[in-house]
Amino acid sequence: VGPVVDALAAHGLSLVPVSGEYIKKGGAPFHLLQEHQCKLVINLRLTDLDGDPMSHFVAWDGDCIHDRPYLSKVNNTYDRTNAEKSKLAFGKLFKKTEFKSWQITTVYRLCQ
């Protein structure tokens, strides 16, 4: 996150760690998707098909999970209803044909 912090600061923005609000019993995906209007940056650990881990960031605005050039629009009546369905909303971006696994490791709030 280091170089990103400097770039954001130049624009009057900062990232505040808020993982404890979301990474808890019931699963981070479920708790994140309960937000309907937010500016969150989510750090994930992706494991590729060879078993190699990598760090990856996406954004969540309460409507879509942004992973340029892709996004996953969250369905209010399906994706937000339980932990398994919430995982599927993220899983659309990290398909089993491309990744062995994914895990949310840190959540940041984008603040002015």
Image (cartoon, grey):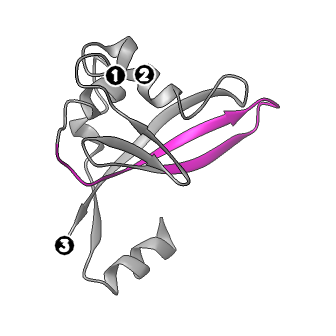
Question: Pointer 2: what residue?
Answer: 87
Which of pointers 3 and 1 indicates the residue nearer the eye? 3
Question: In which quarter of the view is residue 80 placed?
Answer: top left
Q: Which of marks 1 and 2 is nearer the N terminus?
A: 1
Q: What stretch is highlighted in magenta?
A: 37-57
Discs 1, 2 touching: Cβ within 8 Å:
yes
Question: In which quarter of the view is residue 79 placed?
Answer: top left
Q: What residue type is labelled 3?
A: Gln
Say what secondary structure mark 2 lies in. Answer: helix
Q: Considering depth in this image, is 102 or 74 the residue closer to the camera? A: 74
Residue 54, given in percent of the width and then of the height, sits at: 66, 45
Q: Which of marks 3 and 1 is nearer the N terminus?
A: 1
Residue 96, given in percent of the width and then of the height, sits at: 67, 22
Q: Viewed as shown, does residue 56 lie left or right of 1? A: right
- Residue 20 drawn in magenta: no
Crowd tier of the residue under label 3, counting other residues whose Cα lies within 10 Å: few below 14, some 14–19, many 20 or above: few
Discs 3, 1 touching: Cβ within 8 Å:
no
Crowd tier of the residue under label 2, counting other residues whose Cα lies within 10 Å: few below 14, some 14–19, many 20 or above: some
Question: Pointer 3: what residue?
Answer: 112
- Residue 38 drawn in magenta: yes
Q: Which amino acid does label 2 sit on?
A: Lys
Say what secondary structure mark 1 lies in. Answer: loop
Q: Which amino acid does label 1 sit on?
A: Gly
Question: Pointer 1: what residue?
Answer: 27
Q: Considering depth in this image, is 13 or 69 the residue closer to the camera? A: 69
Mark-to-mark CA distance, 1 and 2 = 8 Å
Q: Earlier in the sequence, mark 3 or mark 2?
A: 2
Which part of the image, by quadrant, shows the C terminus?
A: bottom left
**Image: 108 above or below 83:** below
Residue 20, given in percent of the width and then of the height, sits at: 25, 39
Question: In which quarter of the view is residue 85 placed?
Answer: top left
* Magenta segment, prevailing SS (helix, strand or loop): strand
